[in-house]
Amino acid sequence: MFAFALTLVTLVAEAVGGWISGSLALLADAGHMLVDAGALMFAWLGAYFARRPADALRSFGYARLEVLVGYTNALTQMLLVAWIIYEAVGRFLQPAPILSGMMLAVAMAGLLVNVFVLRVLGGHDHDDLNSAAARLHVIGDLLGSIGAVAAAVLVGQFDWLWADPAISILVSLLILNSAWRLLRRSAHILLEGVPEGIEGDVVKSRLEGDIDGVREIHHVHVWQLSGGQRVATLHARLEDGMPPDAAIARIQAGLRSHFRITHATVQIDTEHCDQAGCNAGPAARLK
């Protein structure tokens, strides 16, 4: 919330400064910060609601909100990049005068605020997509401020008016790269894709090899609720005399220690499994 307040104040200053000075780089950074202010607000809301306990309607709770927020933030970044590039092309075709002194002063102030906001946000867990999305936006702001400072110097010292739209496009492409990676990762989780670093055959072979009394593992499904919460379901056939409860406990322990899967549902099968896809063998479907 503190980062949101700082960003909101800075974007107003950059918007006014960009309008008066005629700098697209400042206006682009202000527009970027407008999206970022909303992103920081949504990040806070996502973190707040993700802590709510499960209820009758959402038995897994609200943890996936952080992924939805990350996905939405990535999309808004892409829309912003498209707008900046469109405006920059217009500036190339029709250069406009720029007050480089005002542009430099406002850009420097924005740069300092963005550095401070990053320190306020601090580090984040690699699996926390909500925090990653918020930091992505602020890093984009930081790049935009650096670009605006560079453009102001080039315009002021060499009267290179093209530097303003050129640097705006360069910064936009850097932002686009990060936004695309976040979008792909968030979409993968929302589509219940396999967590990074996990393969179905590996899960099957590891459990069959490490756990005594387990004859076969099949019908394996692994997905994520959010960035750090992995879930699995699987079927197991046991050796004669192996207690089912003990087998389930060992399988769940193996999933936690080897694959960081914290929630697993294990179905014990007898000689035959009638469920569709159950007998896929080594090529068992992984969801």
Image (tube, rainbow, N blue to C red):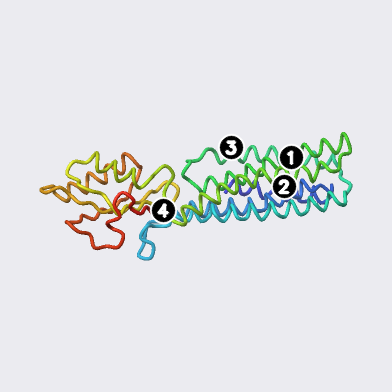
Kind of residue indicated by mark 2? Asp
Q: Residue at x 54, y 38 (%)?
A: 122
Q: Which residue is mark 1?
A: 147
Left-right relation of 91 to 44: right
Q: Which residue is mark 2?
A: 29
Q: Earlier in the sequence, mark 4 or mark 1?
A: 1
Kind of residue indicated by mark 4? Leu
Q: Judging from the image, what secondary structure is the residue with disc 2 in?
A: helix
Q: Residue at x 86, y 39 (%)?
A: 160
Q: Earlier in the sequence, mark 2 or mark 1?
A: 2
Kind of residue indicated by mark 3? Arg
Q: How many marks?
A: 4
**Marks 2 and 1, how far apart at CA:** 9 Å
Q: Quadrant of residue 278?
A: bottom left
Mark 1 or 3: in front is: 1
Mark 3 or 2: in front is: 2
Q: Position of residue 75 (x, y in %)?
A: 60, 55
Q: Earlier in the sequence, mark 3 or mark 2?
A: 2
Mark 4 or 2: in front is: 4
Q: Which residue is mark 3?
A: 119
Looking at the image, residue 251 lies above or below residue 54:
above
| Quadrant where the image shows the C terminus | bottom left
**Quick one: label 3, few (<14), some, or many (20+) residues within 10 Å?**
few
Q: Earlier in the sequence, mark 1 or mark 3?
A: 3
**Marks 3 and 4, how far apart at CA:** 29 Å
**Quick one: label 4, few (<14), some, or many (20+) residues within 10 Å?**
some
Q: Which residue is mark 4?
A: 225
Q: Position of residue 29 (x, y in %)?
A: 72, 47
